[in-house]
Amino acid sequence: QVQLVESGGGLVQAGGSLRLSCAASGRTFSSYVMGWFRQAPGKEREFVASIRWSGGSTSYADSVKGRFTISRDNAKNTVYLQMSVLKPEDTAIYYCAARQYPLGHFGSWGQGTQVTVSS
């Protein structure tokens, strides 16, 4: 069973940076794609970024391109989301998720971590 535990959220001023971490366990993740999603109050959950564990290919939402970077540490089974030039509209609960490559859906989710960006 896949277990995902996020950490690193908090309160930051606009223009600042935060790094989120997602510790993954319960599987060998070489055949997985890991993703970050977020949900703001009153809005639907949206895709932020993803990374294929094997090979490291990445994908980003247009709203975060050039500001966020997703990466993974194979030795620590951890996925990171480095967030820079944060904006108030980045305020949301951020969730880590996992799916099998190539055709799985994101069916494993963490509990989420709150990111609040003040103006």
Image: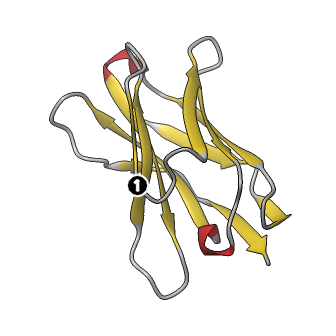
Q: Residue at x 80, y 61 (%)?
A: 10
Quadrant occupied by the C terminus: bottom right
Of all residues shown, which one is farthest toward the left?
103
Q: Residue at x 83, y 64 (%)?
A: 12
State left or right for residue 99 relative to residue 77.
left
Counting from the top left corner in percent of width and height, residue 104 is at 20, 39
Q: Residue at x 48, y 28 (%)?
A: 26
* Type of amino acid under label 1: Asp
Q: What residue is disc 1 on?
A: 62
State left or right for residue 11 relative to residue 91.
right
Label 1: how many residues lie within 10 Å, few (<14), some (14-19) or many (20+)?
A: few
State left or right for residue 72 relative to residue 46.
right
Q: Residue at x 56, y 24 (%)?
A: 72
Residue 27 placement: quadrant: top left
Counting from the top left corner in percent of width and height, residue 53 is at 42, 21
State left or right for residue 86 relative to residue 77.
right
Q: Nearer the viewer, residue 87 or 113?
A: 87
Secondary structure at badge 1 equals loop
Residue 80 in view of the camera = yes
| 2 shown above or below 105 | above
